Amino acid sequence: MAAYADAVVSERGTRPDVTNLGVAGWTTDDLRSFVTTDADARAALARADTVLVIIGANDLFRLGAARAGGPDPSALPGYLTTLAGRLDETLAAVREAHGDGDATFLVAGYWDILSADDDPEGTASLAMEAVNATICAAAEDAGMGFVDLDHAFAKAGGASGLVSNDGLHPDAEGVRVIGEAFAAATP
Protein backbone atom coordinates (compact mmCIF):
# COMPACT_ATOMS: atom_id res chain seq x y z
CA MET A 1 0.00 0.00 0.00
CA ALA A 2 1.73 3.12 -1.25
CA ALA A 3 -0.09 5.38 1.25
CA TYR A 4 1.39 3.37 4.11
CA ALA A 5 4.89 3.63 2.62
CA ASP A 6 4.43 7.39 2.15
CA ALA A 7 3.33 7.78 5.78
CA VAL A 8 6.28 5.73 7.06
CA VAL A 9 8.66 7.93 5.02
CA SER A 10 7.04 11.01 6.52
CA GLU A 11 7.32 9.66 10.10
CA ARG A 12 10.66 7.83 9.96
CA GLY A 13 12.50 9.08 6.90
CA THR A 14 12.92 5.65 5.29
CA ARG A 15 10.70 4.03 2.72
CA PRO A 16 9.70 0.41 3.36
CA ASP A 17 9.46 -2.13 0.57
CA VAL A 18 5.76 -2.82 0.08
CA THR A 19 4.11 -5.86 -1.46
CA ASN A 20 0.37 -5.40 -1.86
CA LEU A 21 -1.42 -8.75 -1.87
CA GLY A 22 -4.87 -7.18 -1.52
CA VAL A 23 -7.63 -7.90 -4.00
CA ALA A 24 -10.76 -5.77 -4.12
CA GLY A 25 -13.92 -7.69 -3.38
CA TRP A 26 -12.32 -10.49 -1.40
CA THR A 27 -13.89 -12.02 1.68
CA THR A 28 -12.09 -13.63 4.59
CA ASP A 29 -12.53 -17.00 2.85
CA ASP A 30 -10.79 -15.68 -0.27
CA LEU A 31 -7.85 -14.33 1.74
CA ARG A 32 -7.53 -17.52 3.78
CA SER A 33 -7.52 -19.66 0.65
CA PHE A 34 -4.94 -17.39 -0.99
CA VAL A 35 -2.46 -17.40 1.89
CA THR A 36 -2.75 -21.15 2.36
CA THR A 37 -2.33 -22.12 -1.31
CA ASP A 38 -0.39 -19.44 -3.19
CA ALA A 39 3.36 -19.98 -2.94
CA ASP A 40 4.22 -16.40 -3.92
CA ALA A 41 1.87 -15.01 -1.26
CA ARG A 42 3.33 -17.31 1.37
CA ALA A 43 6.86 -16.27 0.41
CA ALA A 44 5.94 -12.57 0.58
CA LEU A 45 4.36 -13.05 4.00
CA ALA A 46 7.36 -15.02 5.26
CA ARG A 47 9.67 -12.10 4.31
CA ALA A 48 7.45 -9.39 5.79
CA ASP A 49 8.36 -7.55 8.94
CA THR A 50 4.98 -5.78 8.97
CA VAL A 51 1.71 -7.32 7.79
CA LEU A 52 -1.35 -5.10 7.29
CA VAL A 53 -4.79 -6.71 6.99
CA ILE A 54 -8.05 -5.07 5.94
CA ILE A 55 -10.74 -7.73 5.58
CA GLY A 56 -14.31 -8.44 6.60
CA ALA A 57 -16.51 -5.81 4.96
CA ASN A 58 -17.29 -7.96 1.93
CA ASP A 59 -18.26 -10.81 4.27
CA LEU A 60 -20.87 -8.52 5.82
CA PHE A 61 -22.23 -7.44 2.47
CA ARG A 62 -22.47 -11.00 1.20
CA LEU A 63 -24.15 -12.11 4.43
CA GLY A 64 -26.74 -9.38 3.96
CA ALA A 65 -25.76 -7.16 6.88
CA ALA A 66 -25.79 -4.07 4.67
CA ARG A 67 -29.19 -3.24 3.24
CA ALA A 68 -31.49 -0.31 2.62
CA GLY A 69 -32.54 1.17 5.95
CA GLY A 70 -29.42 -0.10 7.72
CA PRO A 71 -28.57 -3.48 9.18
CA ASP A 72 -31.28 -5.63 10.73
CA PRO A 73 -30.56 -5.46 14.48
CA SER A 74 -32.11 -8.88 15.09
CA ALA A 75 -29.82 -10.53 12.51
CA LEU A 76 -26.64 -8.72 13.54
CA PRO A 77 -25.57 -11.21 16.25
CA GLY A 78 -25.60 -14.02 13.67
CA TYR A 79 -23.57 -11.95 11.21
CA LEU A 80 -21.03 -11.15 13.91
CA THR A 81 -20.70 -14.77 15.00
CA THR A 82 -20.08 -15.83 11.39
CA LEU A 83 -17.62 -12.97 10.83
CA ALA A 84 -15.74 -13.76 14.06
CA GLY A 85 -15.24 -17.40 13.06
CA ARG A 86 -14.06 -16.49 9.60
CA LEU A 87 -11.69 -13.84 10.94
CA ASP A 88 -10.21 -16.26 13.48
CA GLU A 89 -9.46 -18.81 10.76
CA THR A 90 -8.13 -16.22 8.31
CA LEU A 91 -5.86 -14.43 10.75
CA ALA A 92 -4.48 -17.77 11.93
CA ALA A 93 -3.73 -18.64 8.29
CA VAL A 94 -1.97 -15.28 7.77
CA ARG A 95 0.16 -15.86 10.86
CA GLU A 96 0.92 -19.46 9.84
CA ALA A 97 1.95 -18.33 6.35
CA HIS A 98 4.36 -15.83 7.91
CA GLY A 99 6.04 -18.46 10.03
CA ASP A 100 7.84 -18.08 13.34
CA GLY A 101 9.86 -14.94 12.64
CA ASP A 102 9.27 -11.60 14.30
CA ALA A 103 6.73 -9.34 12.65
CA THR A 104 4.15 -6.72 13.41
CA PHE A 105 0.62 -7.72 12.43
CA LEU A 106 -2.01 -4.99 12.21
CA VAL A 107 -5.69 -5.57 11.44
CA ALA A 108 -7.96 -2.66 10.54
CA GLY A 109 -11.48 -1.96 11.58
CA TYR A 110 -13.80 0.05 9.36
CA TRP A 111 -15.36 3.45 9.13
CA ASP A 112 -19.17 3.53 8.90
CA ILE A 113 -19.63 1.11 5.99
CA LEU A 114 -23.13 0.06 7.07
CA SER A 115 -24.71 3.50 7.07
CA ALA A 116 -28.08 4.02 5.48
CA ASP A 117 -29.78 7.15 4.20
CA ASP A 118 -32.73 6.60 6.53
CA ASP A 119 -31.49 5.44 9.93
CA PRO A 120 -33.26 7.52 12.59
CA GLU A 121 -32.39 5.12 15.44
CA GLY A 122 -28.69 5.09 14.54
CA THR A 123 -28.63 1.31 14.16
CA ALA A 124 -25.87 1.54 11.54
CA SER A 125 -23.50 3.29 13.94
CA LEU A 126 -24.25 0.78 16.69
CA ALA A 127 -23.78 -2.05 14.21
CA MET A 128 -20.39 -0.67 13.12
CA GLU A 129 -19.29 -0.44 16.75
CA ALA A 130 -20.19 -4.12 17.13
CA VAL A 131 -18.43 -5.05 13.87
CA ASN A 132 -15.27 -3.21 14.93
CA ALA A 133 -15.40 -4.83 18.38
CA THR A 134 -15.60 -8.22 16.62
CA ILE A 135 -12.62 -7.41 14.38
CA CYS A 136 -10.65 -6.06 17.35
CA ALA A 137 -11.33 -9.20 19.40
CA ALA A 138 -10.27 -11.46 16.51
CA ALA A 139 -7.07 -9.44 16.04
CA GLU A 140 -6.27 -9.59 19.76
CA ASP A 141 -7.02 -13.33 19.87
CA ALA A 142 -4.52 -13.79 17.02
CA GLY A 143 -1.90 -11.67 18.81
CA MET A 144 -2.28 -8.86 16.31
CA GLY A 145 -2.79 -5.14 16.77
CA PHE A 146 -6.05 -3.39 15.90
CA VAL A 147 -6.11 -0.16 13.89
CA ASP A 148 -9.30 1.83 14.46
CA LEU A 149 -10.04 3.38 11.07
CA ASP A 150 -13.40 4.70 12.29
CA HIS A 151 -11.50 6.82 14.80
CA ALA A 152 -8.91 7.84 12.19
CA PHE A 153 -11.66 8.90 9.77
CA ALA A 154 -13.52 10.82 12.50
CA LYS A 155 -10.30 12.59 13.47
CA ALA A 156 -9.80 13.57 9.80
CA GLY A 157 -13.27 15.14 9.58
CA GLY A 158 -15.55 12.14 9.08
CA ALA A 159 -16.10 9.39 6.57
CA SER A 160 -18.33 11.50 4.33
CA GLY A 161 -15.31 13.53 3.21
CA LEU A 162 -13.06 10.50 2.78
CA VAL A 163 -15.08 8.09 0.66
CA SER A 164 -15.77 7.97 -3.05
CA ASN A 165 -19.11 8.69 -4.68
CA ASP A 166 -20.29 5.15 -3.93
CA GLY A 167 -20.38 6.12 -0.24
CA LEU A 168 -18.30 3.12 0.76
CA HIS A 169 -14.78 2.91 -0.67
CA PRO A 170 -12.15 5.40 0.43
CA ASP A 171 -11.16 8.14 -1.98
CA ALA A 172 -7.53 9.28 -2.34
CA GLU A 173 -7.71 11.29 0.88
CA GLY A 174 -9.29 8.33 2.69
CA VAL A 175 -6.51 6.06 1.49
CA ARG A 176 -3.98 8.57 2.80
CA VAL A 177 -5.70 8.56 6.21
CA ILE A 178 -5.65 4.74 6.23
CA GLY A 179 -1.93 4.70 5.42
CA GLU A 180 -1.22 7.19 8.19
CA ALA A 181 -3.28 5.20 10.70
CA PHE A 182 -1.34 2.03 9.91
CA ALA A 183 1.99 3.90 10.05
CA ALA A 184 1.11 5.42 13.44
CA ALA A 185 0.32 1.93 14.78
CA THR A 186 3.57 0.42 13.50
CA PRO A 187 6.17 0.17 16.26
Image (tube, rainbow, N blue to C red):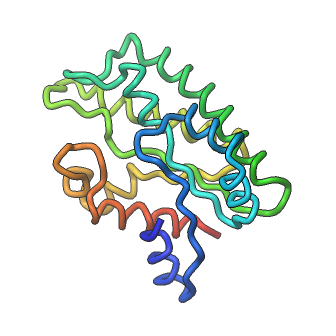
* Picture coordinates of residue 116, whole percent (x, y): 20, 30
Q: Nearer the viewer, residue 77 or 104?
A: 104
| Residue at the outermost top position | 74
Residue for point 60% across, 34% down: 87
Quadrant in which the C terminus appears: bottom right
Q: Residue 124 sits in which quadrant?
A: top left
Residue placed most toward the observer, 149 or 28: 28
Q: Residue furthest right?
A: 100
Q: Nearer the viewer, residue 49 or 73?
A: 49
Residue located farthest toward the front when viewing the structure as drawn = 39
Horizontal side of residue 67 vs 39, given as left or right: left
Residue 115 vertical placement versus 186 (above, below): above
Q: Position of residue 93 (x, y in %)?
A: 71, 40
Q: Is residue 11 above or below residue 41?
A: below
| Residue 185 found in image quarter | bottom right
Residue positioned 47% across, 39% down in the render: 26
Q: Residue at x 57, y 86 (%)?
A: 14
**Residue at 21% of width from left, 52% of height from top?**
164
Q: Is residue 14 above or below residue 169?
A: below
Quick one: which residue is furthest to the bottom in this view?
13
Residue 63 x, y percent position in the rendering: 42, 20
Residue 127 place in picture, x, y as percent: 38, 28
- What count of labels does the image hold? 0
